[in-house]
Image: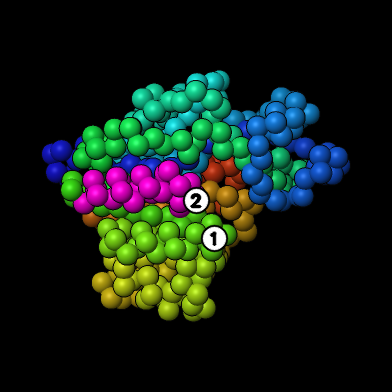
Amino acid sequence: MPFNKTIELASFGNTIVDIEYTVSDELLMDLGIEKSSMTLIDHPTKNRIMAMLGPSSHMSSGGSTANSVFIAALRGLKTFHCGVVGNDTLGSVVHDAFAGATIQSSLSAWSQSGDTACCLVLITPDGERTMLTYLGVSSRFLPTFDYDSIINRTRIMLIEGYLIPDDTVYDIILNTVIPLAAQHKTTLALTLSNDGIVTAFTNRFHELMDTHCIHTVFCNKAESFALTHHHHVADQAAYMSHHIPEVIITDNQYGAYSHHNGVFHHHPTTPVTPLDTTGAGDAFAGIYLAHRIRSRSVSDACIAANYIAGHAVQGYSPRPHQLQTAIAKMPSL
């Protein structure tokens, strides 16, 4: 690693605290919430529902690309998270989580007045999870933040697609992060995050691709279709490869597909019975990038990422105990 690249993997994304509650189906009906749905809520709704739910059963720091760097840190990488939290109790929870995982972050320097983002995870007796997300200050990235000193020290930065709809953050990514990455020879990776977001903001994702500064893209088949409008995964990958050197498309029990150096390849996995797929993509990206950073091949990285993603879906929460145990048993990088 170049002497000035002291951060192997940095994330650029939302910082969210997952707050889990055990609830009954009847309570969901009383709250007027559709079971198994994922919904954005505002501040008054968050406070009202939390007051009705009472004490939570578990809290953990999350966010999509933040989860990826937590996973990469477990593989021994030197990591950093670029994110924003509020000056509240949940912000302290996030600080403690990153410090405990020895992940550097911008959280103290970029802290804002207001609420840290949270996701209320309502778990019914059958294991189904209904998620209500309040974004708080998580997307309040400011043009005045010191992005240069972080990007200069970073080997690969993973950008979260969930941020693309925000006008200010999108402008920062396009006109600050990408030029600084090019200047400092920092490799950029991008998650597409959600097919609905890709559909609504297709032009923005294409504009990022057209810079030819994004080296790696992570998406699932639904997100890939939303971007390319091709039905066959090989055609989707080939389309993106005109702009992106390393394309990774995940496909649940069928594993993953890659397009790299002009070669399309399927990387099958061993199917498992999933309990919760929430953090599978985040875990896949974290392990994949950790292996690529440590000079493993695309094929080896996909095999390892498939293996860990399979463990990620066999427990609840984005980083279940089963996942962390599986990572601990992997050979050192």
Magenta residues span 159-182
- Locate residue 150, reporting x and y percent: 27, 36
> Tag 2: residue type?
Pro
Task: Give the side of residue 265 with respect to residue 129, left or right.
Answer: left
Query: Image point 75% across, 30% down: which residue?
Result: 48
Disc on the earlier residue, 2 or 1? 2
Query: Image point 62% across, 50% down: which residue?
Result: 276
* Circle count: 2
- Label 2 Cα crowd, 10 Å radius (few <14 / some 14-19 / many 20+): some
Q: Is residue 176 above or below residue 258?
A: above
Give me the disc on residue 138: none
Instruction: State the predominant SS element of the stretch in magenta.
Output: helix
Query: Image point 72% across, 41% down: which residue?
Result: 123
Give me the disc on residue 200: 1
Q: Is residue 166 above or below residue 269?
A: above
Colour setting:
rainbow
Q: Secondary structure at mark 1?
A: helix
Mark 2 sits on what residue? 165
Q: Is residue 109 above or below residue 157?
A: above
- Label 1 Cα crowd, 10 Å radius (few <14 / some 14-19 / many 20+): few
Residue 178 inside the magenta-drawn segment? yes
Query: Image point 41% across, 49% down: which residue?
Result: 170
Q: Nearer the viewer, residue 330 or 150?
A: 150
Q: Quadrant of residue 168?
A: top left
Task: Give the side of residue 79 with respect to residue 46, left or right.
Answer: left
Residue 332 visible in the picture: no
> Tag 1: residue type?
Ala
Q: Quadrant of residue 261?
A: bottom left
Find out whether the residues at labels 2 and 1 contact each other: C-beta distance under 8 Å. Answer: yes
Residue 257 visible in the picture: yes
Residue 220 inside the magenta-drawn segment? no
Q: Quadrant of the N terminus?
A: top left
